[in-house]
Image (cartoon, rainbow, N blue to C red):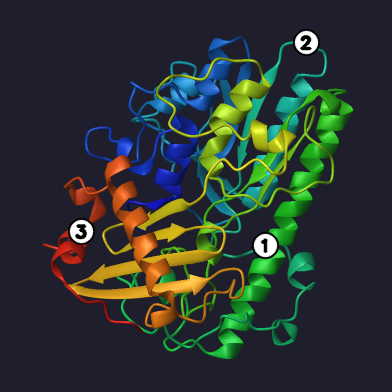
Amino acid sequence: MGGSSPAVCSPSRASLFSGRTLWNLENQGTFGFEISEAYKTLPQVFRENGYITFATGKNEPGKKGHFARSFSTADKILFRGMSNQYNLPLHAFEKDGVYEGKKSVMHKGQHSAEVYADACIRFLESQKESTTPFFAYVAFQTPHDPRTHPKEYKDMYTASDIDLPQAYRPEHPFDNGMLKIRDEKLAGFPRKENEVQKHIADDYATITHTDAQIGRILDALRKTGRYENSIIVFTSDNGLAIGRHGLLGKQNIYDHSVHVPLIIAGPGVPRGETRDQLCYIYDLYPTLCEKAGLEVPDSVQFISLNPLIKNKDTVLRDHLYFAFMNWQRGIRTKQYKLIEYCVDGTRHTQLFNMAKDPIEMVNLAGNPEYKDILNDLRKKLQQDRKSLNDGRSTSAFTTRQGTDFWNTYDTVDTSVIP
């Protein structure tokens, strides 16, 4: 759905755990950096229904509250957005749930993905003789930068052999509000082809290494004898641009950054099938509760995917709504995508035909033939603005004094069509 800060992963994780939409996460003004006690978390529901709930890896947000009520056990917990992959400030599980004031222990010399896989494997091995159901949450911090990995994986990819993305551009055509932040400064301006190739090669190597660790976890699950009776879900953080549209990070709402993988396997899930429908990863909350026969809390605002899992023609959503801070808003149907930008009093509009132009390179917003489609998507944008509670005044959605997306959108009559 988007983010309320450059650290998109924090509000995204909060939506996943709480089942709440981006503007209905507020806990003392944080908008996604902690989950209010008013909302039961996904693992909390499982825990309260007799499951052992386990976590390892990246768990921001959560240090101040919801982690303790969500998980009955854990190992190697990272309560921050990122770290060096070989130098990890990790917390051990605290039975009293108090992590404030506790010093993390530096874990050196082993890659983060291996550390978290090892922790999960130890947990799975501890469950071999148990008949108690479990919920295991493994949050790798890769392929987030720094994109470092063992040499054997680095040697799999040669930068000069990597094809540039079709959407590669040396520069973004206009200010999207986030062009000079840390993530974007990991490569020079304008983007050089060889530098982008190196970043992509490192990204591929990091992903391949992480994939191997996932394989180790699945092998360990099989050895417990409980593989066939487990629901397994794979999804990810927001995607990185790495040269597409002249961007490097994830602080945007192009499809390369909001369209993430989602794989569900296990009992009651058809094998080897795909579903070409719109959804949010946050729909996993009610989906998994239903799969386990657990009641979905009334506070959950997302939709179960189970009807779609059963029938590929089921349409749960006809469009999705996206946002990034106070700079960007978007509407995505199966065929079209509207992105509106409001930065320092200037509006830009992009309209893409996703069926014909999935890499979002041909802007149709200024084409009179698409005027009706543009107007229809703008109506949906305004409707969702209200229904999703978007537009509340909060400093959590802005880093520039006096900047407000909707104030500019409502008062500037015309958009610059880049």
Of the residues under marks 3 and 1, which one precedes in the sequence? 1
Q: Is residue 68 left or right of residue 414?
A: right
Q: Secondary structure at mark 1?
A: helix
Marks 1 and 2, Cα distance to the nearest angstrom? 35 Å
- Whole-percent x, y for residue 88 in the image: 53, 48
Q: Nearer the viewer, residue 221 or 108?
A: 221
Which residue, given by chain and number where applicable, does mark 3 sit on?
Answer: 406
Specify few, some or many for label 2: CA neighbours under 10 Å numbering under 14, 14-19, or 20 or more: few
Q: Earlier in the sequence, mark 1 or mark 2?
A: 2
Q: Amino acid at mark 2?
A: Thr
Residue highlighted by disc 2: 131
Residue 271 location in percent, x, y?
Answer: 84, 40
Q: Amino acid at mark 3?
A: Trp
Considering the image in quadrants, where does the C terminus appear? bottom left
Instruction: Classify residue 100 by image quadrant.
Output: top left
| Residue at x-position 46% and y-position 49% | 9
Instruction: Confirm whether residue 76 shows in the render.
Output: no
Crowd tier of the residue under label 1, counting other residues whose Cα lies within 10 Å: few below 14, some 14–19, many 20 or above: many
Q: Secondary structure at mark 2?
A: loop
Vertical relation: 216 (above or below) 93: below
Mark 3 is surrounded, within 10 Å at the Cα level, by few (under 14), some (14 to 19) or many (20 or more) other residues, namely some
Q: Nearer the viewer, residue 155 or 42?
A: 42
